[in-house]
């Protein structure tokens, strides 16, 4: 018997968590002498009040969709992949190499190639921790997080010593050719007579992310492999007894997860920056964890959570631009949301479950 | 009808004032942060001086990561800020793509001189000339005959600083030993006082007794350690003499504050193009105030002022690292 109805699990708990985070954030803003109502107003109009704001919100959401899905897939196999950041960084390297060294005739082909390159690099970066977990029992949390640092160092080295154009001071690769420029939402929507901000970076990879959502849903709930992944996630001995190989599931789930995280680079590296810069991931790999937790590892939930975090990111950027709220506090506000929706989930869940049980008893 | 008209009129005037209110300058700090006591803080000082004198207001943002550069630029340009002032060479690439999209907005790029765009005011500084002067002072003040240089990120710009410094030191004492280290190869090297402190200790153990920090926020650690260990240091960009009175020999001034102040003062009528600020334009120089007056002897001052004049008159030329990506006085 379910402890509480599905709608409460999916909608009510995240909502209450969010409200709690919002109240605490408001207190923090009040504490430094700013007006919280004004701040919320700024965040909402800045992130959702114009096509420019939407463009950035969706751009960030695209990043979080990929990393959120990556974490979600691994969650189903009860793997806690916190290496999304490193996998996305390496995915960026894959995209950069594909875009810089292959003369693509058209962006659509380039996107296909870049997606493959990004997924391969991301998956390769996840493969080593996955192998160590599957064969040696090294804990995936430890190895993936250590691989984030190695990824940052590798990227540092590659950008400073190999990809930096001659004479340039900035540790960044050269700009990609015009032909691999991905159409932005502005360019995509213009033929339909919809005017969308030209400056916003949301691009065609948002659609790629939506497709990834559907594919992940199909994979997890409509294929044999997905069934095996979920079975393994629920009970390893049970899955083994049913003839499912632990090594195979760990490897496959982590490779898919790393590939998804890597594919984020089609958005931030290929779609936005059009060159590889340091820190291009901007912490999206870690946000992906919160997105997956909040979205209950379901692609649709991940989609909603990604939009929410896209809003928080863009709203936070607006706050930094137009108020004197220092940048550290904006990080605090974002962290509060993550804390409440991710880590403190049980704080809301337990009392709610009790409440629903009590209600049910009352009826019976 | 009349009500409608007045309403529309009110709305229009509201829109107009809103637009006018936004035509204020905007300032984008580089990754070291606003209060790095050096490069970015110089810009902050220039901007606040302008705000105090004119009563005007400006927008500002401290970048948190490399990926934000373009968004910050676009957002300010989109909101009608004019001019948009950017700090540091790393803004060159984002500017090259953004500036063309906002032809009516004027941009200011400090430390960038190589872009081809009609609406950018590009300001370069002759850091090698200023560094030459402080290099002379370092060699004169040194008793051990060894002087140190701590750079931030290892890029041609910082080698350019070090090269001028080495030439100045060698001009005074041809046998001087110059120890040079860079903090790192990424922008994180601009804000790593701990590493700066370690490098200072390492240079002291090699005999250095005057150390020049050209490293943004990292320099704070260099100056602190030098003061703790009882040797002299040289600050950079802003006047850092006051950080440790009597322990900082001088500071190589790079008048980013003047550049920012001038840009804000000119407002929308800003002149664009490439501007080089050398000793003659007082774009660079060395700092002399009450905090370091006891450290600077009359001989020292006379020699440095003569060199300064010679450079301005063209009788003395300091080789720029950029000329052929190498330095005659030191190997990095």
Image (tube, coloured by chain):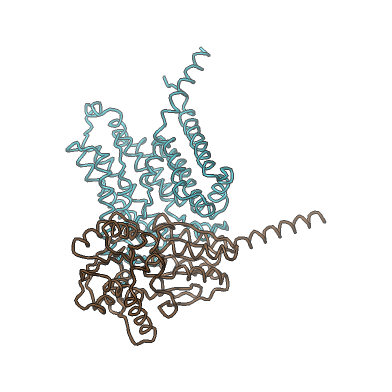
The quadrant where residue A286 appears:
top left
**Which is nearer the eye, A254 or B244?**
B244
| Chain in cyan on the image | A
Residue B128, placed above or below residue B69: below
Q: How far across and how far down the image is residue A191, in percent?
A: 54, 60
Q: Residue furthest right?
A: B2
Name the residue located 49 percent from the left edge and 29 percent from the top edge: A7
* Residue A86 in view in this figure: yes
**Which is nearer the eye, A295 or B142?**
B142
Residue A154, placed above or below residue A257: below
Picture quarter with the N terminus of chain B: bottom right
Q: Residue furthest left?
A: A136
* Residue A172 in view in this figure: no
Q: How far across and how far down the image is residue A294, in percent?
A: 42, 36
Residue A231, placed above or below residue A302: above
The quadrant where residue A280 appears:
bottom left
**Which is nearer the eye, B316 or A161?**
B316
**Which is nearer the eye, B283 or B90?**
B283
Q: How far across and how far down the image is residue A263, in percent?
A: 35, 51
Picture quarter with the C terminus of chain B: bottom left
Q: How far across and how far down the image is residue A91, in percent?
A: 31, 53
Query: Which color was chain B given?
Result: brown
């Amino acid at each position: 018997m379910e402890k509480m109805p599905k709608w409460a699990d999916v909608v009510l708990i995240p909502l209450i968590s969010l409200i709690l985070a919002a109240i605490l954030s408001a207190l923090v803003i009040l504490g430094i002498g700013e007006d919280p109502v004004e701040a919320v107003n700024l965040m909402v109009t800045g992130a959702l009040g114009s096509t420019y704001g939407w463009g950035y919100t969706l751009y960030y959401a695209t990043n979080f969709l990929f990393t959120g899905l990556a974490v979600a897939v691994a969650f189903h196999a009860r793997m806690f992949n916190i290496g999304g950041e490193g996998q996305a960084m390496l995915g960026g390297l894959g995209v950069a190499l594909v875009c810089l060294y292959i003369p693509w005739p058209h962006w659509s082909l380039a996107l296909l190639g870049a997606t493959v390159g990004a997924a391969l690099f991301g998956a390769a970066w996840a493969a080593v921790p996955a192998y160590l977990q599957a064969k040696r029992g090294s804990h995936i949390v430890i190895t993936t997080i250590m691989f984030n640092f190695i990824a940052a160092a590798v990227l540092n080295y590659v950008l400073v010593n190999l990809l930096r154009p001659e004479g340039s001071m900035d540790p960044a690769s050269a700009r990609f050719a015009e032909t691999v420029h991905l159409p932005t939402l502005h360019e995509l929507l213009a033929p339909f007579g919809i005017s969308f901000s030209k400056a916003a970076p949301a691009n065609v990879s948002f659609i790629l992310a939506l497709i990834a959502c559907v594919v992940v849903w199909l994979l997890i709930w409509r294929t044999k492999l997905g069934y095996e992944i979920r079975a393994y996630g629920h009970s390893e001995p049970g899955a083994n007894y049913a003839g499912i190989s632990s090594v195979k599931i760990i490897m496959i789930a982590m490779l898919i997860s790393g590939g998804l995280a890597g594919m984020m680079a089609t958005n931030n590296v290929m779609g936005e920056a059009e060159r590889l810069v340091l820190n291009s991931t901007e912490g999206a790999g870690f946000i992906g964890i919160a997105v997956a937790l909040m979205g209950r590892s379901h692609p649709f939930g991940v989609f909603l959570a990604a939009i929410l975090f896209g809003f928080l990111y863009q709203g936070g950027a607006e706050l930094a631009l137009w108020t004197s709220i220092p940048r550290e506090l904006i990080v605090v506000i974002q962290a509060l949301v993550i804390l409440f929706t991710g880590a403190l989930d049980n704080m809301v869940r337990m009392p709610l479950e009790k409440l629903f049980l009590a209600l049910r008893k009352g009826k019976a | 009808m009349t009500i409608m008209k007045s309403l529309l009129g009110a709305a229009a005037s509201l829109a107009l004032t809103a637009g006018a209110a936004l035509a204020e300058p905007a300032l984008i700090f580089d990754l070291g942060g606003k209060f790095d006591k050096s490069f970015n803080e110089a810009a902050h000082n220039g901007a606040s001086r302008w705000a105090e004198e004119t009563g005007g207001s400006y927008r500002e943002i401290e970048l948190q990561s490399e990926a934000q550069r373009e968004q910050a630029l676009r957002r300010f340009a989109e909101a009608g800020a004019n001019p948009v002032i950017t700090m540091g060479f790393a803004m060159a690439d984002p500017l090259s793509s953004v500036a063309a999209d906002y032809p009516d907005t004027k941009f200011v790029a400090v430390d960038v001189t190589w872009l081809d765009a009609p609406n950018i005011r590009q300001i370069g500084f002759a850091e090698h000339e200023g560094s030459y002067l402080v290099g002379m002072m370092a060699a004169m003040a040194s008793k051990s005959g060894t002087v140190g240089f701590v750079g931030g990120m290892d890029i041609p710009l910082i080698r350019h600083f070090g090269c001028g410094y080495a030439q100045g030191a060698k001009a005074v004492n041809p046998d001087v030993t110059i120890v040079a280290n860079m903090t790192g190869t990424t922008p994180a090297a601009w804000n790593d006082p701990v590493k700066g402190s370690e490098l200072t200790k390492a240079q002291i153990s090699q005999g250095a007794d005057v150390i020049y920090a050209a490293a943004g926020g990292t320099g704070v650690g260099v100056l602190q350690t030098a003061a703790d260990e009882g040797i002299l240091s040289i600050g950079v960009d802003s006047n850092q003499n006051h950080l440790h009175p009597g322990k900082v020999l001088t500071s190589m001034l790079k008048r980013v504050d003047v550049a920012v102040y001038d840009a804000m003062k000119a407002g929308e009528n800003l002149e664009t193009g490439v501007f080089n600020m050398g000793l003659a334009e007082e774009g660079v120089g060395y700092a002399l105030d009450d905090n370091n007056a006891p450290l600077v002897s009359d001989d020292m001052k006379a020699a440095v002022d003569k060199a300064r004049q010679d450079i301005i008159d063209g009788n003395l030329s300091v080789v720029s690292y950029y000329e052929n990506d190498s330095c005659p006085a030191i190997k990095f």
